[in-house]
Each structure stands twice: as structure tokens, then as C-alpha cells.
Amino acid sequence: MKFTIAYTLLFLYVVAAIVFWGYSLRKQNNIVYQLEIEKLELRNIPSHSEIYKQEMFKIEDKKKRRTKQFYGEESTFLFVILLSAGIVYFAYYRQRQVSKLQQNFMLSVTHELKTPIAGIKLNMQTLDKRKLDETTQQKLIKSSVEETNRLNDLCNNILIATQLDDNKKAIYSEDINLVQLIDEQIAEMTNRYPKLEIITDIQSTSYSFNGDKTLWKMVLSNLMENARKYSPNQTPIEISFLQKANKAILSVKDNGVGIPDEEKSRIFDKFYRIGNENTRKSKGTGLGLYIVKKIVTLYKYDISVRNNTPQGSIFEVTFA
């Protein structure tokens, strides 16, 4: 707020100074014009003579050229000031947006870290202080493993996001069977969320390309996790893969609330999450879709999002 007020006052002062400077120069130009006429009058040249007319023409021409010069310089200065002010304010606005997103990220990542740690701690304390039957012990151990996996995923997302940001992530070139990779990730999701229903529509037995398998596992994992996270309970997510012409399309569909059109262009931004950190119900850090976009773009493929019918979203990765 203080910056905005100071910035506005400084901007208005600079603009006022330029306008006043232009006004003063034009005023001085009129004074010079009058002095030159008076000087011409002192030469006692008849006003009807050709010499007088030529001298008057020169005086008026100088005045016009000076006027054009002053207006040109004033306009140029005003344009430069307005352009610079716009760039500075846009940079300031963007910095505020990034700062807000980072603050939301810190709030969400703190919550994301504390929740599984608290769960693991409670499970371990229960196992330590109570004599439980084997079934209950296995249940607590399984819950601890799941929370540990959440922590591992979170750490991986933060690490990969940082590496991709700095372009320091090595891209290993290996042959990846995408259909097999999809099956592996579906099996992992089913094992992690036994109640989650996953509908598959795989219209190809094999599709291979060169890439970093670890990165593409993260693409599939984040897309599936995003679909699960934003889908209501007891509603399935759908994974489809098809090949047509020279393209292959991977689709991940959910039946959630969907994404407003004005938000679609921002959901791949780093730290960005729809809604307010204090009111949104879904968990997350705003890194998943950012990582997906960075990896897909890194390999020069395309990713898009569109509305599902009757509700939800469809994320499509196009391999071409």
C-alpha cells in the first residue's frame, strides 16, 4: 500500500514536471519570437519590402520548428515515462502475485508436512504403548507407509520443481513403453487408494518414445493424483490412451467441480491453486500441474485442459 501511494505520487510529480517544462519552453519560444520581431523592427526595414518579408518568414519558420521540437520532446518523454511506469508497476504487481502464491505454498506445504508426520507419530506411539492384535498392527503399519509415501511424493515434487526451474535436471534418454507405464501407475494408485475406481480405455497395446522414465512417472502420477483429489468420493476417474494418424493422446478425466475458463490459463503456474488457502478443501502445494507442464513442454509435447461432460475436467497430453 505504501509503495503504491509513493509510486503514484512520484509518477504524478514526474508527469507534472514534464508538462510544466514543456509549457515553459513554449512560453520562452513566444518571448524569443517577440524579441526577434523587435530586433527586426530596429533595423528600420520597410514592412512592405521583400527583405522584410523574407526575414519575417525566417523568424516564423524558426518559431514553428522550435514548437515542433518542444512538442516532440515532450511527447517522447511522456511516452517513455508512461512505458517505464507501466513496466515497473507490472513487475511490482507480478512480484506481489508471486509473493502471495509463495505464501499460500508455505501454508499448504506446512500443512502437507505436518499431517502425515502427525499420523505416523500417532501410529508409532499407539504401537509402542499398547498391545494390539496383529490385524490392528498391520493396519497401523500400512497407514504409516501410506503417510510416508505422501511425504516422499511431496519431497519429490519440491525437488523436481526446483531442478526443472534451474534447468539442472538431467534428461536420461531411454526407451519408454507408455502403455506399460500407464498400467504400472494405475496399479500403484489402486494399491494406494483401494476404494478409488479407475476406468481405463487403452486403445493401444504399445507406444514407445525416448525420455526420462522417472519424469514421466511423475507426469502420470500427478495427473492421476490431481484427478483423484478433485473428484467427489465414490466417483471414478478415467484414464484413456489412443493413437490416431501421427498422434497419440493420453487423457485423464475426473468428475469434479471443473475449472472455470478464466482459471484454465493459470493452473499450470508455479504455486497456483484455485481458491483461497484458508477456504479450499483439497490438499496440495500448487506444484503438481506445474511439474507436469514443465516436463511435457521439455519434451516438446502439448498438454491442454478442457471441460468434461457433464462435469469435471479432462487433461490431455498429445504426443506428436
Image (spheres, rainbow, N blue to C red):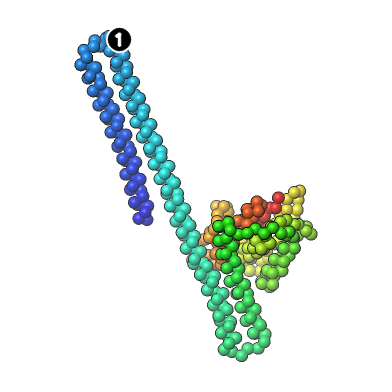
Residue 229 position within the rendered picture, expressed as x and y whole percent measured from the top left: 61, 66
Q: x and y percent of residue 175 in the render?
A: 73, 59
Give the vertical position of 28 relative to 271 (above or below). Answer: above
Tell whether 287 sits left or right of 97.
right
Q: Which residue is mark 1?
A: 50
- When the figure is inspected, residue 283 is found, relative to residue 130, above or below; the finding is above
Q: Which quadrant of the view contains residue 181?
A: bottom right
Residue closest to the eye, 274 or 186: 186
* Residue sticking out furthest to the top: 49
Percent x, y of residue 261: 57, 52
The correct choice, above or below, for 176 with respect to 65 in the image is below
Question: Does any portion of residue 16 appear in the rendered image?
Answer: yes
Q: Where's the N terminus, which quadrant?
A: bottom left
Q: Nearer the viewer, residue 210 or 203?
A: 210
Q: Residues within 10 Å of mark 1 (few under 14, many from 20)?
A: few
At 46% from the left and 59% from the top, the residue drawn is: 99
- Residue 68 image-quadrant placement: top left
Outermost residue, bottom side: 131
Observer able to see residue 201: no
Pinpoint residue 130: horizontal percent, then vertical percent.
59, 89
| In the image, farthest residue toward the right | 205
Q: Residue at x 28, y 27 (%)?
A: 29
Q: Residue at x 33, y 38 (%)?
A: 18
- Disc 1, SS: helix
Q: Nearer the viewer, residue 134 or 36?
A: 36
Is residue 114 left or right of 76 when viewed as pictured?
right
Q: What is the three-letter code of the residue carrying label 1?
A: Glu
Q: Is residue 280 left or right of residue 181?
A: left
